[in-house]
Image (cartoon, coloured by chain):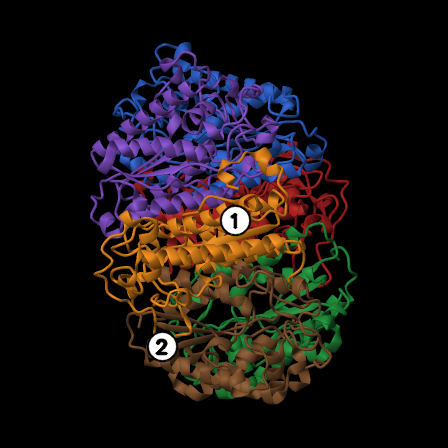
Chain colours: A orange, B purple, C blue, D red, E green, F brown
Amino acid sequence: MKLAEMTWPQVTALSPDVPIVIPTAALEQHGHHLPLFTDSMLVGEVTRRAEAALADKIVLTPVMWLGNSAHHLDFAGTMSAGPRTYIDLVGDMVENFLRHGFRRIVIINGHGGNNVPGQHALFEVRQRHRDEDDLLLLFAPYWALGTRPNELDASIQQQAMQHACEWETSMMLALAPHLVGDYKNTQVVDPRHACEPAMRAWTTKDRSAAGHVGDPSAATAVKGETLLAAFATDAINLLQRVVNWSGRGWN
Amino acid sequence: MKLAEMTWPQVTALSPDVPIVIPTAALEQHGHHLPLFTDSMLVGEVTRRAEAALADKIVLTPVMWLGNSAHHLDFAGTMSAGPRTYIDLVGDMVENFLRHGFRRIVIINGHGGNNVPGQHALFEVRQRHRDEDDLLLLFAPYWALGTRPNELDASIQQQAMQHACEWETSMMLALAPHLVGDYKNTQVVDPRHACEPAMRAWTTKDRSAAGHVGDPSAATAVKGETLLAAFATDAINLLQRVVNWSGRGWN
Amino acid sequence: MKLAEMTWPQVTALSPDVPIVIPTAALEQHGHHLPLFTDSMLVGEVTRRAEAALADKIVLTPVMWLGNSAHHLDFAGTMSAGPRTYIDLVGDMVENFLRHGFRRIVIINGHGGNNVPGQHALFEVRQRHRDEDDLLLLFAPYWALGTRPNELDASIQQQAMQHACEWETSMMLALAPHLVGDYKNTQVVDPRHACEPAMRAWTTKDRSAAGHVGDPSAATAVKGETLLAAFATDAINLLQRVVNWSGRGWN
Amino acid sequence: MKLAEMTWPQVTALSPDVPIVIPTAALEQHGHHLPLFTDSMLVGEVTRRAEAALADKIVLTPVMWLGNSAHHLDFAGTMSAGPRTYIDLVGDMVENFLRHGFRRIVIINGHGGNNVPGQHALFEVRQRHRDEDDLLLLFAPYWALGTRPNELDASIQQQAMQHACEWETSMMLALAPHLVGDYKNTQVVDPRHACEPAMRAWTTKDRSAAGHVGDPSAATAVKGETLLAAFATDAINLLQRVVNWSGRGWN
Amino acid sequence: MKLAEMTWPQVTALSPDVPIVIPTAALEQHGHHLPLFTDSMLVGEVTRRAEAALADKIVLTPVMWLGNSAHHLDFAGTMSAGPRTYIDLVGDMVENFLRHGFRRIVIINGHGGNNVPGQHALFEVRQRHRDEDDLLLLFAPYWALGTRPNELDASIQQQAMQHACEWETSMMLALAPHLVGDYKNTQVVDPRHACEPAMRAWTTKDRSAAGHVGDPSAATAVKGETLLAAFATDAINLLQRVVNWSGRGWN
Amino acid sequence: MKLAEMTWPQVTALSPDVPIVIPTAALEQHGHHLPLFTDSMLVGEVTRRAEAALADKIVLTPVMWLGNSAHHLDFAGTMSAGPRTYIDLVGDMVENFLRHGFRRIVIINGHGGNNVPGQHALFEVRQRHRDEDDLLLLFAPYWALGTRPNELDASIQQQAMQHACEWETSMMLALAPHLVGDYKNTQVVDPRHACEPAMRAWTTKDRSAAGHVGDPSAATAVKGETLLAAFATDAINLLQRVVNWSGRGWN
């Protein structure tokens, strides 16, 4: 079910156990070859497929396309909520549904910069409602829910999500090829840094003059559809487990 | 130009005098007969027409569909940023474009609850940049830019925007009739209160058990197209004046 | 009744239905010819007359003379709460009286810069107390409560409140002429801007080098008394309606 | 000089070395016998006398009558800024004058509850302007500037300021006897607690059912004038030292 | 009892009347001759002795060594919570123990810069729990609990705590002489300022180029042990009174 | 070098390229068998060894023992900064050292609940200093820097850090056996949940009535020393890489 198209009496009529799915993404630079809305389009497609598959088992909100992207702000066009605003924003959206009586809220995230503040927002909400043991608050980056893409197609080189990379470029070639620019003549930008696996705070311009990280030139539309299908399947499986959840406790 | 579809080098190449247009709206209850996304769909349509007419003279961002709707939260499905989060959110979006060098930012608003915090956000931004005398920061509710609908069609009864009312229901009948429920059998909800013209702080449930304010039953698709066309024309005229602005000072 | 002169047992003895009247104003530049305290003196006089007329029907607090005036801070002497501080300040004052059990709180405002943050503060208070359907929280700029001054005296040129203008200068001539400087040799400053009716965020120095907006030279003490009397009558009528309010619901 | 009566060009013309004097007070319960505005009236009188004595050597702002009085909120009529709002409020007022170029800001405080947050506000301002070594930011409770009242009149029993006590009641008898209720039949409330000299966080209702602390029945108007005169002299002496200050450094 | 070494079931088993003792201090510059951790070491020693004496009558937390030291930040190595962070930090720690059911919380403070924000934090906590009349929240700077050191040893010159001064240097000589540098060749820095007793907001570099205030050269290890013993006795006496407290009300 | 024992002139004399190491931990419940200070003791030992090995190549601050532990607050004795306070706290500490001119700041974290807010704090700091391309801000949980313990000792069963688990209990047996209670008779608490790998927001009491997660009964002191040695080596290696860092850019 698409929340946007429902009326309030229809929402009132739902079971409180119906999972609410909130896709989060961003509008930020994606190098010279991908549009600013890439993350929002991709998570929009993944969750669109999930909603199509699960029909009336879940409620899907519109994509919250404004993300936590301050690290990209040196590249024109990038929009970003401030880091604290973003925590507030995610927390407010989750609280909205708790007020309406829902107990299972799943954020399907499509932008790496949202991972940390999005999880923090859920942490805060959970503690505020600490005595409600029937809450299931999940944060799920769509690209990290189980699929290992190169097990599906050995020609997929990349091992983990990067930025405006082989994976994202491939998916955009599959989804909206008219919005993809010259990705063939891009440089490979190595994602690694000298002090791994320690986590380093960064701004994009320190890592990549062009804005992308990884190797966009390896992208193909076929890989893209493989990735979209796999990520959508992961999301569907996760949401089905949410539907099946016992309703109490941790396991 | 649609920001969502641009790359960052394309945005960098623009003149700093190009107006940035940010549509703001909401996802909140619209009575028994209209979908939660009504405000976002309507301002989306108004600004879509404006962008189509003005082409490369303006940059249009996606609709910020999360609004300030705490007063509607007693009706299920409503999503709302907290009142302070909303001020932060609008202010952050405007600051994004100032950082990118743009000087003319226009918020086209499609939700009444955004009027006060949206204006406050612009006030704060303006003071933080107080010595930049080339800034034009505008807040423009699309329904209050000049058009008097009943001068265009005397059968339009309503004098000002209400909520899920003759105007909004008409526009939804024109734009997405499949999402409009039974608006014929709705009660008239008088918008006036005992202490007008003083401004009264309210929650929706004090005013309307069904959620709408005004008379939805007076709606027609023909009125809807008249309204959409008039509001789009108002927006186009406003934005053309922004394009024509001298670039400095008040007048 | 004047709150300042009461003891706490006297306040405890009041009916919770007695309206609490909080005058809000500012201490900000008023051009070369009017003192910084103009707004506070004027709303003080309007509410003084209202309290005199309504006697024990209302409780009047002292004038909160610190306002939201960041847009005037380029002119020396101006004092201003920060924009967020002002929202907090107004909200805190209203919460004080809700805690004491009062249900009808009326802000009579005497400074344009307070309109937006003052309304936002009331909005926030209202939502925090969303289930109390017996609250009447009003925000009332004293110059916009019904009176059309030029219907009372056709020689009054100005149509709406401006700043250190014909209206304010006239009222100060009536109230405290010894504090009025040379208003005859002032320039007319047109309040309009290029993108009306869109609301534009501003700082005063962009609009007026002298600080005033409008035509102070048209002021007379006679006009001033006409205005004060009319605005006081408006305030009295509003407060009488608050006294008469049914005690529940919207109408 | 009274800031309220000045115009902005007059303030612009002042030396940046002129001390700005901001009286801070409160509107809070003062037992059964004193009005809510007691603190504001008393610091108003002390600073009125100082301004009369020092004439054009200082600038006096209006009394900021809203204080930090959350501990009195169980007594009806008390108004209070929230504890954080109060820090913001004081800090904002001081910043206003730093922006206008003044370097010597003196808060003359008339309410005990303001001492801690008022000092904290000044601390924050000082650190924000840490490299300006010509700032003199002072916080001065008027009753603690040197005078030992019982050295002036041995019949004055009280050793330090309490609340609605011998001192405050005496001063009100001298200043506004028509606002003083039956102070003769009040109980003595001992200010001491079991763990002195450790500072204990308190709410008034834990200490005094009537609201006062100390012995109001010992008050006389003669004592009141003695106290007012002595406290005004202290304030004048302090401000004269501020005028005489070297302009740099600590000593 | 040392909280650090306890398990949660052991804490659960305690009486809610057991006092919780939280030592607060700082890590900030202490001139050329004392280490940055001086305040934390000293309050650590004072409370260590108190815990040793009172055994299972109190619970002692670790020293919160991060303090409010923004005024020392011009001297390298100084660490400081921001002024608001510090209020939050202290308030959060106190709230932790209220949540666990304890009613008597004593902050033994070892750093002057904590006095104001620490007291403000306790004020805020007290008001949030305003209806709990069994709370005893104390803020106690260890050097101001009764002892007058020069009554114990007439060779102690200093009358009140200063910074990296005779007192602190003496105590460090007694406690950790290997960490004390050349204190003999230090200049006397007069703590007084021109506008005493008004409280002046300061940064250290305005007062002392070396960082200390007072006369370190007067320090001896013998004085240091005298001071430590006296301050520990004061703390023990205070905590014994807390143990003995009636459990309700002010006295 | 231990910051606590240094004077400010010694810190001033350091190269700005010296890494600053801030250990972060917590004081929170660790089941029935481990003390509240477990995390602080363990990260204290790991960083103590690192400082001993690296001597004057790094500066080590004291352990910030207050962590983000709201999820443990249902267990008595747990202390926690509020979730936002913790972000402020970490950010403030890092800003302290940037102000002092240092460029390489490494947080060695010893408490899982700090991971998300600690990373967020570093993100915020990095963006505030976005144009300083010589900053190296690292967040490093000590247990996730490379070592795979069961490759060192196949009898170590656990694969990743849990809470009061085989690993932590073992290390405490090695470090402070007198503080370890009966860990043999503990139940195994499975860390997994139904919706993995999605991240679920949790409170401890939903997962474990006793407070631990994992299998403490598998602990031995020998395993503990193996773990401590390995984690210390990881920390030393990381810090050596920080020392060797080129000083600019990402790689």
Which residue is located at x 66 percent, y 86 percent? Answer: F177
Q: Check disc 1 and report its element: helix, strand or loop.
A: strand
- State left or right for residue A175 relative to residue B183: left
Write down the residue under mark 2: F12
Q: Note whether F37 is above or below D25 in the view shown.
A: below
**In terms of depth relative to the viewer, which is nearer, F137 or E154?**
F137
F49 to D154, vertically: above or below? below
Are there few (<14), some (14-19), or many (20+) residues within 10 Å of tag 2?
some
The quadrant of the rendering that contains the C terminus of chain C is: top right
Q: Chain of mark 1?
A: A
Q: Which amino acid, by three-letter code, is at mark 1? A: Val
Q: Quadrant of the N terminus of chain C?
A: top right
Q: Secondary structure at mark 2?
A: helix
Of all chains, the one bearing label 2 is F
Asked whether residue F199 is in view, the answer is: yes
Q: Position of residue B187 (x, y in %)?
A: 58, 20
- Residue denoted by label 1: A21
Discs 2/1, front: 1
Q: Are marks 2 and 1 in contact (CB under 8 Å)?
A: no
Q: Which mark is residue E177?
A: none
Taking the image as shown, residue B237 lies to the left or right of residue D129, namely left
Measuring 38% from the left and 60% from the top, which residue is drawn there? D130
- Residue E220, visible in the rendered structure: no
Q: Could you say where residue D70 lies in the image, as x and y percent from the top left?
A: 62, 47
In this rendering, position of residue B162 left or right of residue C187: right
Q: Is residue A66 above or below residue C149?
A: below
Q: Residue at x 63, y 48 (%)?
A: A17
